[in-house]
Amino acid sequence: MSKHSIKIKSIYCTAPSELNITDGDEVYLVCQADGGIPIHIPGGLNEAHNMEAKDTWDLIDDKGNHLILNFEYEVLVTLWDHDLNNDPNLATYLQSHDFEPGSGSSSIHLQNKRDNKADYTIYYEYID
Amino acid sequence: MNTLLETQIANYAGIYQSMTSQEVIKSKQEPALTDSEKEVLLEAQKAWKEYSESSRGQVELKTITTADVPQIQQKIADILDSSEFAQLKQLLDSLDLPTSSFSFGFNVQIEFIIGFTATIGMAIGIGDSKGVAASEFLTIGITEGIDEGGLAGVQFGIWKNAPADLGGYSWSTEVDIGFAIEGGVAVSYTASGGVLGATLTIGGGEEDGVDEEESYTFILDSQENDGDGYLKPAFQPRKNNLLIISSVSCSDASNDDVGSDTDEVYFTFQADGDTLYHYPTYDRYSMQQGDTWNCGRSVWFDQSVVVHIYDEDNNIIGSDDEHLGDYTINISDLTLGQTKTYNSTKDYSSWDDNIGYAIHVKLVAKDVEN
């Protein structure tokens, strides 16, 4: 049923949440296409990618594959900070963006202004 | 299919799908069940037959079809405490078993484009782990040929690992263990080919000749450690229409007792009176007057969606959180491709504190064929 695909190329961290309090964020994505099964990136419930200010996370897996999200209407990408292993209920919401069909390459700046000051940019490319 | 159970299992299916499977080493240990382990499986089969055929058991099992994961876990504990299982528990206590856990769970088959089989179960310590804390687990794997989703029998297991250590990948192969038993017996292996345990599956149309069927076990809760935890619902079964709550805007934040003008915002949504979801699924998003949260939450629905916005006051979502806004979205309000703004129907005119939150809703699909 998927009609569209988007490549999430990288994520850039301008500022992690809780700046100067912790050693960066333990970032993971939850990607949910058309309200379907939520996919955890990196794979595994307790997996995350450490990001400090000025870090770039290239979303390429061990086999060299880019993160491609297939969707029909929209795909919601949510950034989380993995605060405590084994308890997703304690994860910190950083920000989210809902991608609808489009074209070309671009980026989206996501800022959590009031609470934890997380500041991230998602770089993406529509491939279909 | 029980949609709440479906949404809960979907979380674990998504995590399982996102993981990279390990290679299985082909040199497997020869499975060998001791006489006492066979005795346990035979007694488990007998206890289940007595329970499931009893009038009380039949009434209780009907409630399982509408239960969610925590309710099923509670039911499993109740069943293990029933009189029909007393002899089995006595046997587990008295035998000198080489294994460390005994498990009991319900199998569920479910289709999310591809088919999954899940076992929702509980493990208790036996043998070397006698008296060790129990664990609650959910095992998930991909399966083929689901005719109709739903409950698909029960599974008993005896395991080398202690209850809290049953998590991770395993591969099961059906075996003939040399004695007559109702149901299918399979041996589970670790990635290195070592025997992890053996399972007896009763009911649900056991598959014949299963070979190296991969699965992954999440420890949801354990008295020994916290486990992987219960994930909140996020998956939504498809309905006829799809909208996106594109954003939430704040024209006036609430003022709390300590004079803060920031709200710790989250919202719930419920389509057609079905499963209640939170967004963000965990945590909240802080907002002040003039802020807009581009949340982008899609919602499948047939007729209507009810949304409530809350201010999380005490870090425990749902307990006395302040209501910031109520909204009801009807399909008749919306035009395909267009965005409509909803102001709260909650009346704050008699309050000292003005509160103003609006949601902006776009209809992106209508009358979808599913």
Image (cartoon, helix red, strand yellow):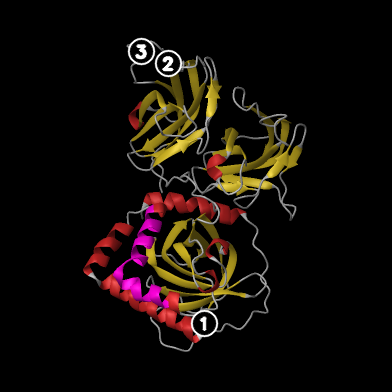
Q: Is residue B218 magenta?
A: no
Camera-side residue: B343 or B80?
Answer: B80
The number of callouts visible is 3
In the displayed orientation, state which residue is furthest to the left.
B55
Residue behind mark 1 = B175
Camera-side residue: B29 or B144?
Answer: B29
For marks 3 and 2, give the CA distance.
9 Å
Asked if the residue under mark 1 is in contact with the one under mark 2, i.e. CB atoms within 8 Å, the reply is no
Residue B90: x, y in percent? 39, 75
Using the image, name the chain to which the residue with label 3 belongs: B
**Residue A45 in sight in this render:** yes
* The residue stretch that appears in magenta: B71-91
For marks 2 and 1, give the CA distance.
65 Å
First reached walking from the N terminus: tag 2 or tag 1: 1
Q: In which quarter of the image is the N terminus of chain B?
A: bottom left
Residue behind mark 2 = B355
Badge number at residue B197: none
Q: What residue type is labelled 2?
A: Ile
Kindly report which numbered mark, 3 or 1, lies closer to the viewer in this rendering.
3
Residue behind mark 3 = B351
Asked if the residue under mark 1 is in contact with the one under mark 3, i.e. CB atoms within 8 Å, the reply is no
Q: What element carries label 3?
A: loop
Residue B236 figure quarter: top left
Q: Is mark 2 on a helix, strand or loop?
A: loop
Residue at 40% across, 46% down: B369
